[in-house]
Amino acid sequence: MIKLLKYCLFLLLALTQISVNAQLVQNIFGRKHLSLNGRWNYIIDPYEMGYYDYRHEPFDQSKTGKGGFYDDRKQVNKSELIEYNFDLSPTMSVPGDWNSQVDKLQFYEGTIWLRNKFVAQPQQGKRYVLYFAAVNYEAHVYLNGKKLGTHKGGFTPFQFEVTDKLKAGENFVVVKADNTRKQDEIPTVNTDWWNYGGITRDVLLAELPSNYITDYKVQLARGNMKQIEAYVKLSEASAGQSVEITIPEADLKATAKTDANGIAKVAFAANKLSLWSPENPKLYQVIVSSATDKVEDKIGFRTIETRGQDILLNGKSIFLRGISMHDENPLIPGRLRGEGDMRMMLQWAKELNCNYVRLAHYPHNEEMNRLADEMGLLVWAEVPVYWTISWENQATYNNAAQQLTDLIERDKNRAAVIIWSIGNETPLSEPRYAFMSKLADKVRSLDNTRLVSAALEVHRKGYNVIVDDPLGEKLDLVSFNQYGGWYWELPKELSKYKFQIKYNKPVIITEVGGDALAGYHADEDTRWSEEFQESLYKHQIPFMNTMTGLRGMTPWILTDFRSPRRQHPFFQDFWNRKGLISESGKKKKAFYVLKDFYDKTEVKYK
Ligand code: GCB
């Protein structure tokens, strides 16, 4: 019996060892930290020979634990056979996807090992967390040759506590990153974007006090412009600890005591706040402190609700003048690498006179949402539940729910984020309904201060464009993609169509558009020409405007983006050309049609 118990305990430990640990630290970039960004040595390993032995048993689960590339072993004995060497291997930038850094990796899908050395001086009584803002898709992480755990999901952060594994002096971290597409994953095998692999976002080592502020949320209460609701969680789960929230500029201070879980909740009046909006992106310095820790953030305060077919921002009806975008730099293709790239994208949206962006189809960088806060752009944030997910697989659901949770937990203090989207164009079926409605409930249980939506599909009967997806019941908005004028009939024929929408909710068109190769000019009936795309927008705008409930749109898409599905050798060459801006930064004709519409709409909604 004791043996059995011991075995179970061992199994439990082994299991916890192979997953990520500790609740994500809120605002980790606002803590004392060492950036581990830089040049990392890498080894391309298509056969995963650094992970499996020749009998295909994982080295890191073998008895000796020896042989895997995470060892970073040096040849001390001249007769020893070691078939890899990080020191002699090339380097690439982290953060950075591998496809855009190394020619031969442009289409690569598989495993690459990355190693970085760093010097640490761990202090007595402090705790250390190794944090990855994103690795696409599956990461196995090792510190000084010992496995810390694994993580799946290419766009959400994860971390490991490494307090007792960190050495004074030189340390090395090794990541096995694998971007192989698989049917049961989120996203699944089929997408319309580039499968950029690698450590695509920042890596850092944070130093925290032994009892630290793990998490906090400081936001206006749902639908209440005069009351802040705050929640603070300390890492030590014990009752009676004091926490304090101050907003010096607004002369606000609130205190509270933790419960037995280390969680403190407090609501307090905030009558004189200057509310956040795209016209007034006011952010306040907010200080959250406990006896042992203190963290500062910049937070905006606003409410968002729907009433009938209206979307109310701070109680006033708003029209969302939006544009969709991918997390990709069209000018130097690859994932957005840092603040400059991100600002460029959001600045382009501003030039279009947007007050809103759809960050499709997966969580974008935390920094992107912070910039949106600062620049006054409302945000639709999404998880990659895209197209044909394995709806009946419980592990797939858990993965989607985890990605959604991590996104919400990460960005819940951002005023800019008003909509959590649970997916895109998922085809109707019973199992899909069960999966998606559980996700919608999940969002509401985690955050009741924002709207829940998904980009739905339409279907057509004759000249009727019908929106009646049963999932609509569960959502706050009727949002859908419609490709009239591109995948359907020509732009000119759009006037024959009518929308038939089942729900009395605000309507947001999440996608509309067509391709144009910048600089290719012809008449408006010639596909791929700028004139065709221009005509499409000219016909779509009055067509969409026939809907009484239209409260916003995010045409597809701000810039051309790379996609392996887009094969036309001349017009596409692996680019989806629906961008309003080309891969050289040129604004196509349609850009100005949409801008003109947004300029007029802005006046109408003032
Ligand atoms: C869609 C998808 C989007 C595609 C787009 C297209 O409906 O949501 O990811 O890129 O259509 O270009 O066809």
Image: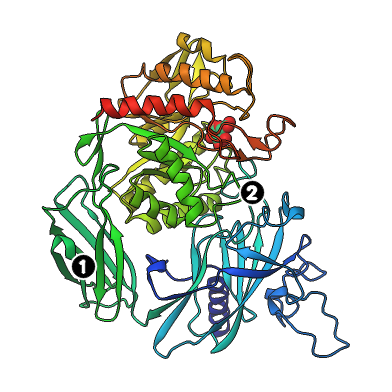
Q: CA distance from mark 2 to mark 1?
A: 42 Å
- Residue furthest toward the right? 79
Q: Which residue is mark 2?
A: 195
Q: Is residue 484 visible?
A: no
Residue, x 31% and y 31% (percent of image)? 319
Mark 2 residue type: Asn
Counting from the top left corner in percent of width and height, residue 252 is at 14, 63
Which of the image's four quarters has the N terminus? bottom right
Mark 1 residue type: Ile
In this rendering, the answer to whether 502 lies above or below 144 is: above
Counting from the top left corner in percent of width and height, residue 603 is at 27, 27
- 473 left or right, relative to 362: left
Q: Are marks 2 and 1 in contact (CB under 8 Å)?
A: no
- 183 left or right, relative to 210: right
Determine the quadrant in which ligand 1 lies.
top right
- 550 left or right, relative to 460: left
Quarter of the image where one finds residue 259: bottom left
Residue, x 51% and y 32% (percent of image)? 556
Q: Residues within 10 Å of mark 1 (few under 14, many from 20)?
A: many
In this rendering, the answer to whether 183 lies above or below 166 is: above
Counting from the top left corner in percent of width and height, residue 591 is at 48, 29
Q: Which residue is mark 1?
A: 245
- Ligand 1 lies under 8 Å from the Cβ of mark 1: no
Q: Residues within 10 Å of mark 2 (few under 14, many from 20)?
A: many
Q: Is residue 286 visible?
A: yes
Quarter of the image where one finds residue 173: bottom right
Mark positioned earlier in the residue sequence (2 or 1): 2
Q: SS for tag 1?
A: strand
Which of the image's four quarters has the C terminus? top left
Towards the viewer: 279 or 549: 279
Counting from the top left corner in percent of width and height, residue 231 is at 25, 63
